[in-house]
Each structure stands twice: as C-alpha cells, then as structure tokens.
Image (spheres, helix red, strand yellow):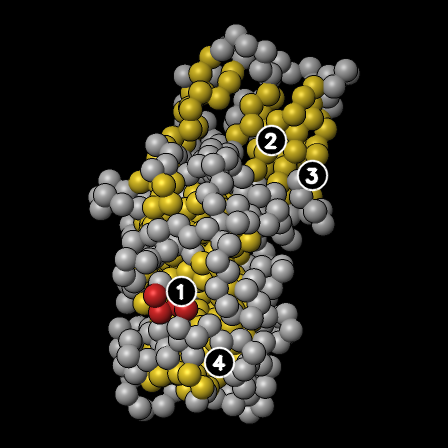
Amino acid sequence: MLLFDRDGNVATTQIVGRWYRTLAVDQAAGQILVQKSYERAQVMLIQKNAASVAGFSPFFLNGLGSSVLISSGKNVIFAGALSPASPAGHLHKTSLSGSLDPVWESAAVQKIGNVSAAAVDPSGRLYVAGLVSTDDAFRTQDLVRLTSTGDRDPTFPTARLLSAWGLAASTLLPLPNGQLLVGGSFDEIAGAPRNKLARLNADGQVDQSFDPGTVLLDYFSFVDAICVQRDGGVLVGGRNQGASSVAVLRLRPDASLDTNFTLIPSWSETHRIIEDSAGKILIAGDFQADAQRNGIARLNPDGTVDLSFKSQPGNARTGYATINDVLLHPDGKLVVAGAFDTLNGSDATGIARLNADGSLDTSFSFPAEPPDGAITKLVISADGSIFLTGDFSRINAAERLGLAKLTPLPTLTAHTWDSVGGFHFSVSAGTGKRVRIESSTDLRSWKILGSYAPSNWPLEIIHASSPDPIQFYRARED
C-alpha cells in the first residue's frame, strides 16, 4: 500500500507491484491511498481536494459572518466589522485577492450602518437597505441606491421603510426592467402602505399596480426569499407565522394570491427560492416538505413536491439541519451551504454539491477541513472561486472569521485508451485559469506534458503510448 500527501507526492520510498487503482480518499487528511491490484488499470489520476483556502486576505467579522454577500464582477461586497473596534454592519468592497477598495472605505456608503440587505442590478448599480438616518434603529430603515464609487445616487430618492420588527428589509431583487422587489417585515415603504413585499419603479417610486394587500400577513412574519418566474409570477417565502404557515406561495403578476398553487405546510423558514430551466422550483431553508425531504426540496410548477428529487441533510449536534443558500449550475447540479454534517447519510459538513436528482455528488470534495460553524451565504466570483460567509472561524485549517474564499483546483477525469495505445483524459479548472499537466512513472520525478488555458473547460488531453508499464498524471495551476 502506498500513501500520498496532499500534493500527490509519495510518502514512502518503495513502490510495490505494477498495477494500481485508487482505493480510498481520506478527505480529512487530504491523502490518497493506493493499493496493489491486478485489474487492468495502467493509469491512475492523482488529484488534490477540489478547493483550497488561499489567496485571500482574512477579515474580522466579529465571528458572525455577513448579512450581505454579493459578487460584483471582479469584486466582492460584504457587510461587517473589519476589527473589534470598527462599527458593525457597514458595506465593504474587496478585490478577489482580498484588497479593500480605498475609494469605498472613504465613501458615503460607510455612513450606512446595520445593513440588512443589498443587491446589484443588471447595470451594476447597488441597492442597500440599512440605517442611514439617526431615527429609531429598531423601526426605521432606508433604502438607497449607490454609484460604483459607493456614493449615494441622487437620481434615486431615499425610500423609508417602517416596521415593528428590527429587519424592515431582508431581501432585495432587482429586475431586468429596472424595477426592484423589496421583501421584509415592513408595513410601509416610501410613504405607501405595503405589507412585507413591494415593487419600486426605476425612479424609486412605489409601483401602484403591485400590491399584495394583506395576503402575506396570514403566512409570514417577514419575507426572506423572492423569485420571479418566467411568466411573471412571484414566488415568496420567509419566516412562517401561525397555523397557516407555508414553505412558499405564489403571487400572480398583479400580486394577487395564486389559489391554484399547492401550499406545503411548514413551521419554520424558507431562505432561498430558485426556478430552474425546466420551470421547477428549488426551495431551501429549515422546513420539512415531507418525511424524506427537509432543508431542501424541488417542487413542480404547480407547487406539488417533485418526488424524483430527494435530499436529506442531517445535523447530529442540533437534531435538525438547515440549508441557508443554494447555487444552481447550468447542468442542474447544486452547491448547497448551511448547518449540516450529513447529506443522504454521507458525511458532508457545511457545504456540498448535489446532483440534479438531489443525491450527493461525490466527485466534488471540499473543503478537507470543514468550517467550524454554519455557512449563511455563498457566491461564485468571476474567476470561479466560491466566497462564503457565516458563523465560522476556521476552514481548511485556515483562520477565517466569518468570511472565506474557496479556490477551485484542477480536476482530472479518465476516459479510455485508443487503438494505438494513447490514453485519453480531460482536465477542468476555474474560469481564466492556466493548468499544467504532468506525468510520472515513479511518483517522484514529474515531466511536464503541457500548459493549457482554454477559453472553455473541460479540455481533452491525449497522451501517446509509452513503453513504461505504468503512468501517473496530475494537474496543477500554472
């Protein structure tokens, strides 16, 4: 048996036998175990974990994570305190490597505290809900629009939100036509009565044609998740309230309740709603859709549970699991994050990837050392990195107080041999990455086969036949 370290280097000085196969991956130690085998396996692919924590300056977020996390082009925007003495809940902009934007640090955005929601519209303008004035912080928030320099946009009037709760606005959703959906616990916005959900026009005025009236009062104490469907319908979720609590409901384009949409009873909260390319609805939170689906479920367009999707997160420490955020890939796979330590009975702590049917994607293995607290939000940046925020202080053996960046590492996939003995395999990496492919016959001396940076991954590689009885391959960032 051979033992390899995280870089694919052999940890013993002796190789036994000629034919090898992968036996197991010890994710906690980041090691690969290889055992002698007499199967036809002339090639083994040595890989690191799928992601590492690197290249990002850590910030102090009081260990509580950020209420806001946005990927804006080649920057990331988050809310938090940069030191124990600095004010909490202010917005900051950083490059993908962790360098703070000095213009933002001195801009008007720093006068907005207790930021509870923010979003970037298709044109790059930033909407922020926070405490702008010195009025009663527990009842009053303002919604403003900022320019790219972090200053107030004078063409967008400040919208005052009134609420008996602390979080007047908890979610913002910019629309392609320039309008903005606002969800929260408010009962008034910009001087107009609206219960928990409103739509603003591009000029900041309340859209008088969209008023849910008292519909949401029976179901939610506040709205935390919004999704606009292709037909203009609006899916709404949030913190449940009373005997009539549901996981998600559907409003028609005019904000009236769609009574043909099946309502699933739920006693807790829905954090995220996504419509996929087939028109099905993904919901995530700490609800229970049925006996086999808690924390995350997929619904049919009519609101009934899609029985072909099954995912069951678990949490041995608390007894119930929460999925706080979801990223949907074009291929139907999902990256999920939250407070859980198993998925469908397999170990998975804090973050994982699911196949389109809800099963755990075992080819997606990161991080080697899971976060020591719940992940609340995640975004993918322009270079393919994943930014996380939450109630954690360490991840992948690195100290990260509430905010971390996971960098995808190259992965290899074996295919087949051709008729002349050439071996075909493919390599995948993050957008804009350059990858070096190396081969070895003894796992000590490595030969560079080539360096690649295609416009689209994966890239197929063909290595011509070799007189050596065995070949090992690895991929590294160049």
State whether residue 294 is above or below residue 142: above
- Report which residue position mark 4 lands on: 104
Quarter of the figure with the N terminus: top left
- Report which residue position mark 1 lands on: 224
- Report which residue position mark 3 lands on: 459
Of residues 456 and 2, the one nearer the viewer is 456
Q: Position of residue 117 (x, y in %)?
A: 42, 72
Q: Residues within 10 Å of mark 2 (few under 14, many from 20)?
A: some
First-in-chain label (1 vs 2): 1
Residue pictured at 53% horizontal, 45% vertical: 300
Q: Residue furthest right?
A: 420
First-in-chain label (1 vs 4): 4
Q: CA distance from mark 3 to mark 4?
A: 39 Å
- Report which residue position mark 2 lands on: 413
Q: Position of residue 339 (x, y in %)?
A: 32, 49
Can residue 213 be seen in this snapshot? yes
Q: Is residue 74 left or right of residue 273?
A: right
Can residue 58 be seen in this snapshot? no
- The image shows a total of numbered marks equal to 4
Of residues 435 and 252, the one nearer the viewer is 252
At mark 1, the secondary structure is strand
Q: Position of residue 242 (x, y in %)?
A: 27, 61
At mark 3, the secondary structure is strand
Which mark is nearer the camera, 1 or 2?
1
Residue type, label 1: Asp
Q: Is residue 348 left or right of residue 448?
A: left
At mark 2, the secondary structure is strand
Q: CA distance from mark 1 to mark 4?
A: 27 Å
Q: Residue furthest top?
A: 38
